[in-house]
Amino acid sequence: MEAPKTLFLTLKKEFFDQIKNGVKTSEFREYKKHWIHNFIYIYAL
């Protein structure tokens, strides 16, 4: 079985703690060229 791919996101501690504690249940990123390139690269591996 192939290992799942990992997505690394840079988060400020404030937001990480909110996600960890279940307060913040989603993370949104602006739809920009940078993110499109990164996601295409990750999924192409």
Image: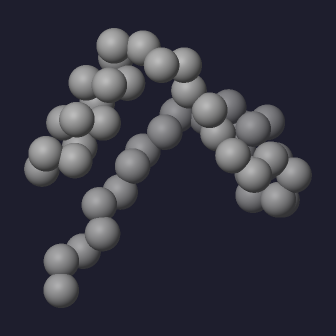
Residue at 22%, 35% (x, y): give it. 40
**Figure colour scheme:** one colour
Answer left or right for 19 relative to 37: right
Q: Looking at this rendering, what residue extends furthest in the top direction?
A: 33
Q: Quadrant of the rendered structure where residue 32 is?
A: top left
Q: State whether residue 43 is above or below residue 36.
A: below
Residue at 87%, 52% (x, y): give it. 23
Q: Looking at this rendering, what residue extends furthest in the right direction?
A: 23
Residue at 52%, 34% (x, y): give it. 10
Q: How many marks?
A: 0
Task: Give the percent coordinates (x, y) of residue 11.
Answer: 61, 34
Q: State whether residue 20 is above or below residue 8.
A: below
Q: Quadrant of the rendered structure where residue 4 is?
A: bottom left
Task: Give the percent coordinates (x, y) of residue 37.
Answer: 25, 24
Residue at 33%, 13% (x, y): give it. 33
Q: State whether residue 19 is above or below residue 37.
A: below
Q: Quadrant of the N terminus?
A: bottom left
Q: Quadrant of the rendered structure where residue 12 is?
A: top right
Q: Nearer the viewer, residue 17 or 33?
A: 33
Answer left or right for 10 relative to 23: left
